Image: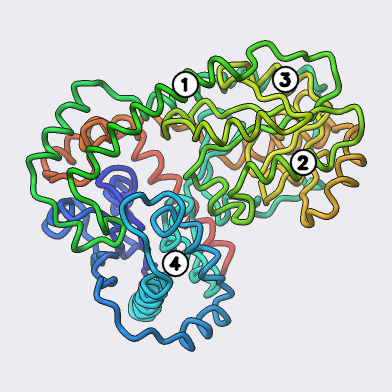
Amino acid sequence: MKKNIVFWINSAGLFFGVAYFLQKNTNLNLYAICDVEDKQKSFFTQQKLVDFKQTYFFHDCVKKDKTRINYEYLRSFEQKYGIDLWKLAINDRWFYLYNDFYKFTAEEISSILEQECRFYEEFLENVKPDYLICMDPSTHHHRILYEMCRNKGIKVLLLTWAKGMGNKMMIAQDATKLDNFDFNKIKSSGKSHKELIDFINSLNLQKVKEKIQKQQFSSKSLLLKATVKFLFSQNNNIETHYSYYGRTKLKVLIKKIIIEIKAKYRQSFIDKNLSRDPVLDVPFVYFPLHMDQEQNPLITAPFFTNQLEAIRHVVKSLPPGYALYIKEHPHQLLRGWRKISSYKEILEIPNVIFIHPEYSSDDLVKNSALIITISGSTGLEGAFYDKPSIVFSDVRYSVLPSVYRLNNLDELPTVIKNNLHKKTSPEYLEKYVTFMSDNSFDVDLIDLLINEANSLYYGGFLVDTEISSEKVQEFFDENKEVLEKIAQEYSNKIDNVNSTSH
């Protein structure tokens, strides 16, 4: 019997490409939910490259005109699926903190949530999928579908980075936990911390980080082409996508100019005020900042989105004699840096040393007494250097004995004191690395995403643009090796799940 596979597609590249190569498996029925901009819709409506049984367009389910909200339905939906809708909605970048174009009312948000939930329930009832294939959800509406599928026993196969393992990727049901992990079932060859450090250095993680940043900074010529295309093309998304409410070309252009100007002033403030030469031979706890407007911490750690408050919580909890070293995330430049007022607030907190984003994070990790992170991979990097860590949300590496998952802020002072001198175990770390290596595969996803942006979306500067089947086919042909490999990994994963379920 054929299995029904649903793809969550938000571009004509990655997962549409995976579907293109996965359709060779004739034991699968393919369906698509497209979360795409208005100008891409015609391509997905008319395309013949992938034989989807049916294609659904997410934004067709949400109407701007408010209907009477059935709050009893929303409450019963939450209870039925175990989903806290407002926890997701209030952290969505469009609904609250990061939308400069439109202020959503509580009624508008509730109306959108109800329409989304009803669409998903009808969709799941009609299609009865066996699998959902996608990246780890970064928006509230994608997360709702993900949680519903998990609740209903539908297998979710996320393509996620095997963080801390270079270019390796994993296909898993949860991006914050490990599937079927058991230390007792993994053999150790007795590697030392030194040997494990040599291994992690061989992965050249800094090069991977630089490529991620490169993805966001394409050529000026593509930016110019995208700008001209944007200014002289019609825009219907204002009417069809709630993420475009209140947007006009003039407002977008003005905001872009303002961000560029502010970024220069903020860069100047950073260069003048953040430390480039911190003292490392004193006791300190290291707390690296996350980027704003990212899945971490918006989705992964929904109650720690205010990083300034998180810093204050940590400072309050430090034992005497220890300072808190904060480092700005170098990729925050992509957001035009933070407000200068935020930087000033951090600089004014006693016992805090604020470090320049260009300073080596490795040096801070190696010389720290303890690492605290909301949901980043710095704690894993610390384990290689025999440094304990505390995390504020679920992360895969929290299975390590040297990593403490904080569940109650009131416990933070005690937890810090208890973990300051905790030793890591090279045996457990080696077993973790072995498991991650055995359950991941090498594929340069960053290069693929850069190629997709340059080939189809003006370097990523303009996503709301027309797409031709010829250009998409050309992208598939040029990136066949990577897309085919990911598709094969998915096919293997589906076959393994099927064999173990019989």
Distance of label 1 from label 4 (alpha carbons)? 39 Å
Q: Which residue is mark 4?
A: 145
Which label sits in the foreground, 1 or 4? Answer: 1
Report crowding for label 3: few under 14, some 14 to 19, many 20 or more residues within 10 A (C-alpha).
some
What's the residue type where badge 1 is placed?
A: Gln
What's the residue type where badge 2 is placed?
A: Val
Q: Mark 4 or mark 1, which is nearer the start of the sequence?
A: 4
Distance of label 4 from label 3 (alpha carbons)? 39 Å
Picture coordinates of residue 257, whole percent (x, y): 28, 31
- Image quarter hosting the C terminus: bottom right
Q: Which residue is mark 2?
A: 314
SS state under label 4:
helix
Which label sits in the foreground, 3 or 1? Answer: 1
- The front one of 453 and 4 is 453
- The front one of 92 and 52 is 92
Q: Are marks 1 and 4 in contact (CB under 8 Å)?
A: no
Q: Mark 1 or mark 3, which is nearer the start of the sequence?
A: 3
Report crowding for label 2: few under 14, some 14 to 19, many 20 or more residues within 10 A (C-alpha).
some
Q: Which residue is mark 3?
A: 197
Which label sits in the foreground, 1 or 2? Answer: 1
Distance of label 4 from label 2 (alpha carbons)? 34 Å
SS state under label 1:
helix
Q: Is residue 109 above or below residue 453?
A: below
What's the residue type where badge 4 is placed?
A: Leu
Residue placed at 69% from the left, 39% from the top? Answer: 373
Picture coordinates of residue 260, whole percent (x, y): 33, 28
